[in-house]
Image (cartoon, rainbow, N blue to C red):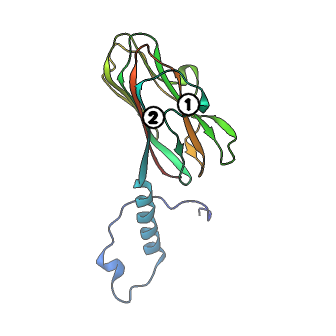
Amino acid sequence: MAGNSTPVISALKKMLVGDVKNNQANSEAINAKLSANINALIDQTFYQEQVRFHGFFESSSYDNGYGGHIRVKGDTKIVSYEMYVRNNGVSGSNILNFQIKDTAGGVIGNLFGSGADRLLIGTNTAKTDSLIGKIVETDTNYSNNVSGLTVQYGDLNYTTLLDGWLLVPFIESNGKNAYNMTFKMALTGA
């Protein structure tokens, strides 16, 4: 038997008339069914955060804050993320990362790794409307309009974020004449 801290497995199961009929015993099976439904609803609840770099952008320091920041609301898991660049530029690479700070402002680390673990859209030509992303749980990468470009989908150093953490975006590298970058991230309760 599972311990008290083990979550009930999520499952959407319809409640039946027989489950709730008059004078029906409040059984362990009914409680398990209700708990599974509640957990399934919690798992499906997520919110989205985004940061935008409007116009031409350049490599920036951690403290620049040009793209804004994300404050984590409650302990969360990262469900998916994507990076979009309106115009990739003509040379170089567009690389985005986030510095993570705790509630006291102390640096915890970076959201994405380095080297082959970066979130990157390269430039070979002035391509427009390029998008890369990842569904974290299934480790599924997706992309639009990146043929002929070098891309790296990023590996997360942290998949669970704690309440109050601050994510400060910074551009590690930018393509020459690149402009308009957006990063979106879907989060759910941990």
Above or below 81: residue 58: above
Q: Amino acid at mark 2?
A: Asp
From the viewer's perspective, is 97 left or right of 41?
A: right
Q: Residue at x 42, y 68 (%)?
A: 33
At numbered mark 2, what does the secondary structure look like: helix, strand or loop?
A: loop
Residue underneath mark 2: 139
What percent of the width, then of the height, locates residue 83? 41, 30
Q: Residue at x 46, y 79 (%)?
A: 27
Dividing the picture into quadrants, the one containing residue 81 is top left
Q: Residue at x 58, y 60 (%)?
A: 6
Given residues 35 and 185, the one toward you in this image is 185
Residue underneath mark 1: 112
Above or below 72: residue 170: above
Dividing the picture into quadrants, the one containing residue 130 is top left
Distance between the Cα atoms at labels 2 and 1?
14 Å
Dividing the picture into quadrants, the one containing residue 109 is top right
Q: Residues within 10 Å of mark 1 (few under 14, many from 20)?
A: many
Given residues 156 and 167, the one toward you in this image is 167
Given residues 94 and 45, the one toward you in this image is 94
Q: Residue at x 54, y 34 (%)?
A: 65
What percent of the width, then of the height, locates residue 182? 40, 32
What percent of the width, then of the height, locates residue 45? 41, 55
